[in-house]
Image (cartoon, rainbow, N blue to C red):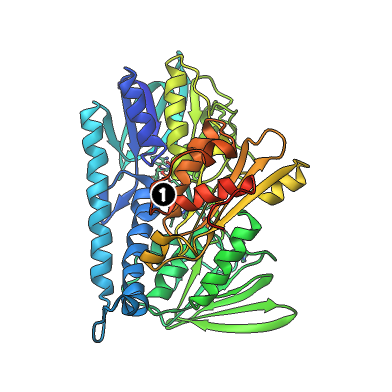
Amino acid sequence: MQNFDVVVIGGGPGGYVAAIRAAQLGFKTACVDGYVRNGKYSLGGTCLNVGCIPSKALLQSSENYAELTHSFAEHGISCDNPQIDIKKMLARKEDIVSKNANGISFLFKKNKITEIHGWASFKTAEGGKYILSIDDKGAQQEISATQVIVATGSNSRHLPQIATDNLNILDNEGALDLTATPKELCVIGAGVIGLEMGSVWSRVGANVTVLEVADKFLPVADEQASKELHKNLIKQGLLIKNSVKIGEIVNADKNVTINYEHNGEQFSLVADKLLVSIGRVPNTNGLNVDAVGLKLDERGFVVVDADCRTNLPNVWAIGDVVRGPMLAHKASEEGVIVAERMAGQHPHFDFNTVPWVIYTNPELAWVGKTEQQLVAEGVKFKKGVSSFMANGRALGLGNSVGFVKVLADEETDRILGVHMVGPFVSELISEAVVAMEFMASSEDLARIIHAHPSLSEVTHEAALACDKRQLHG
Ligand code: FAD
Ligand code: NAI
């Protein structure tokens, strides 16, 4: 039986990064992953295979098409009868995914990490080691490990009333693989996946209706920012209904009928495709946790402390399979931190500085507390808001909707949260993350020189506005 210092179960952004860091720190490391894409084992987990990366590839292609059909004319650029070839758009996405998956295998070789294909489960714990069984398409093997990192990620949550077939009733996998634009797309769940994938298919011609159970749009984000995004998505043609109660769903061969209640009225929507994006559930079913007594919570998440320690000695868990936001960069950072803790180091993870980005148009990004959270916590704060409307770079880009808002402690001026809606805020948010990591004040941000003309000047102006000394507002 092969023995390792560290075995990581799961090769997503949590697991593969943990494996690399563990190997860098001198541990004899293996990573086991069972995900199969197009008949081949493919590292990278949800994020690379059916999540972050393919969705952003499609968002870019569809955005380019939307620009060509709606925005390029104002630049004096026109073209007759623009077309989009959906199959080619998908082939490009596949190419990006394969390149990245091969890149992870390359990194494993470079760091001398053993890549093991198949599904891992706990068999037993003996003599201070954990024995894991691996099922590689029916072929069985066992390996042992002194330390185990569970990084098995998550899967789509399904509606109880209808099965996902990824033909008519889609989850993220099906929504990323449609070979033609549906005429009518219904999306259940106005969360991150629903809005991003709804945007992709709306931009290439689908009529998109988004049905959401909550009474508020995107309550996880700052209210002013969600309102701005909502306004723009509606303008783009997405029909978004909140406070909806989903009833019976009928999957006929050619279409899907979704019955629902909204404002006391009954509706029946016939769609070509239905995307169900109502959150995700942790992958702990196949781990045989009872064999070793690994503790799960009532929802199936592995129970961990602040440092990702489970209830078992030398067993750690990270990423989507544990508490906290289901974000790739959160999973990766937990992977680094666990590897370093195994090596006796004392790194720290600050949940308050995990950035969030929603890749719609405009993009929405934030870090730290929302205004609503600060009010609820009774924190006295000041705010500075500056719009992209007058920013020269944004105007040049032809994308000047949205704003940046900086929230700072009224007394100490320490930045407590930054909220952005607008062009490339997925990139701009990093400055706010750095500022918050360094416990900067809004004055610190206001005194930093920002290049002109650049979108980052809006962040600068928002920081100045905290002290009512905005120069261009
Ligand atoms: P995963 O990426 O889920 O990886 C877990 C891996 O473990 C998988 O390969 C799984 O097959 C494997 N596995 C499970 N059980 C076993 C087992 N028993 N044995 C062996 N292997 C096993 N996050 C962002 O930060 N930014 C984004 O833009 C973003 N976009 C997304 C878009 C979509 C459509 C989706 C669905 C998600 C998106 N996410 C995004 C979320 C992100 O994908 C997850 O937070 C991230 O992948 C979690 O990483 P992980 O390593 O914990 O788990
Ligand atoms: P989500 O939690 O973002 O949104 C789910 C939405 O569905 C919620 O608004 C919820 O109220 C609603 N809902 C739940 N049950 C419902 C029902 N029965 N009827 C109608 N609405 C219902 O989950 P989503 O969009 O599935 O994404 C999963 C996770 O993946 C996210 O939490 C996010 O962390 C991650 N992700 C991150 C991205 C990014 O960082 N850009 C992109 C895509 C996903």
Q: Position of residue 431 (x, y in %)?
A: 46, 42
Foreground: 371 or 164? Answer: 371
Quadrant hosting residue 322: top right
Q: Is residue 294 visible?
A: yes
Q: Name the residue beneath numbered marker 1.
A: 427
Q: Secondary structure at mark 1?
A: helix
Foreground: 134 or 284? Answer: 284
Position of the N terminus by quadrant: top left
Q: Position of residue 246 (x, y in %)?
A: 64, 72
Foreground: 115 or 426? Answer: 426
The verdict on label 1 being within 8 Å of ligand 1 is: no
Q: Is residue 153 visible?
A: no
- Left or right? Give the position of 145 relative to 264: left
Q: Position of residue 411 (x, y in %)?
A: 72, 35
Q: Position of residue 74 (x, y in %)?
A: 34, 78
Quadrant hosting residue 55: bottom left
As displayed, is residue 120 above or below residue 215?
above
